[in-house]
Amino acid sequence: MKLIHCSDIHLGASMRTHLTLEQAKKRQEELLATFSRMVDYAKNNDISGILIAGDLLDTDECDLKTRNFLIHTIENANEINFYYLCGNHDENNLLLHGDALPSNLFVFGNNWTSFQIGNITITGATLGTNNEKLYSSLSLSPQNFNIVVLHGGEVRGTTCNVPDTVNLDLLKNKNIDYLALGHIHTFKTGRLDTRAEYCYSGCLEGRGFDECGEKGFVLLEIINNNLSTTFVPFARRSLYEITVDISELATTREIINKIEQQLANISHESLIRIVLTGSYSLNTEKHLSLILANLENKYFYVQIKDKTHIKLDLQRFIDDVSIAGEFVRSVQNSELDEALKERIIMLGLRVLNGEEVDL
């Protein structure tokens, strides 16, 4: 039997942190399309069920368009069972209210809820602030292949009542074979105990630069109670943060060339954050607007973060008859603390050098 484990899809997310209104709308539509593509993948690859380990929706308020899309997508995949655990973002979502739910959508409750497929038992519960009884009451047959679905960040020890956490130690030796987790947006897997593997599938699509790299779902294949798992990259677009040291560069063209070299193997469909680092002299030509203009039409989205600093040789300004010299002397003679003086001088010299400065 084959199953898909996914989580943290966050349909309906605003996507407006960095993107324009048009880009955000396109990304919202792409999130819906990626979920639909995953369901098509399941149809075409003999997948029996899809485990959704929380945060299918970004908020409790599911708009009618998104709800109708989801209901339609699930109903039109009636050969596949959907096992849905609410997460911290969608625990009271409107998807579960209103018209009757599709017959192939199974929802986990606040107490342990189990669904059976042959000798495979799929069990899950929505964790809260009083989980001690839940952990102690989990009872699974050692003869079955047991999948447990939970949503929360991993903790260890005896902590059990902290919201949005899953205590891995309290789930050891419970006859679990696969612990399907949500909440962490990066794929991660490890051993729970000698019998069980735990896994965060990560999100289907990255939404911000804290979600860089490949995103997708986990494919489970269970044959005679033996499990094999494969992470399947599936995102429409990926996000990347690229660090570029400009210390040895003298011109904007050289900076652009180095950036393009580091982007050579990255798809033009991607969202890119370029972080400029290193030190440079006042003679260096560094124009961020020109760098951005050269790159932004080549990728879906480009952002530049300037974390460079000027090589400060303040002694050269002491007797320098120039605006820069007068500026440095004025700041140096002020009563500001030394750290603030250095920052003001650095920013001021960058402005005098014709650079854009992000305060």
Image (spheres, rainbow, N blue to C red):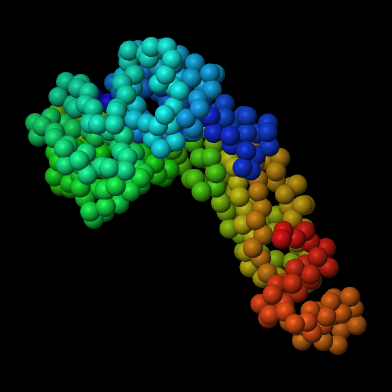
Report x, y in % for residue 91: 40, 32
Report x, y in % for residue 80: 32, 17
Residue sitting at the far right: 321
In depth, the one of 289 and 149 nearer the eye is: 149
Residue at 79% over, 84% down? 333
Q: Is residue 65 left or right of residue 89?
A: right
Image position of 27 with respect to 103: above or below: below
Q: Is residue 205 left or right of residue 270?
A: left
Residue at 49% over, 36% down? 205
In depth, the one of 288 and 127 nearer the eye is: 127
Q: Is residue 205 left or right of residue 113?
A: right
Q: Is residue 250 left or right of residue 180?
A: right
Determine which quarter of the picture holds residue 181: top left
Report x, y in % for residue 177: 19, 37
Residue at 86% over, 88% down? 319
Image position of 41 with respect to 311: above or below: above
Report x, y in % for residue 7: 39, 34
Quick check: can you spot residue 146?
yes
Could you tell me which quadrant the N terminus lies in?
top left
Quick check: can you spot residue 37?
no
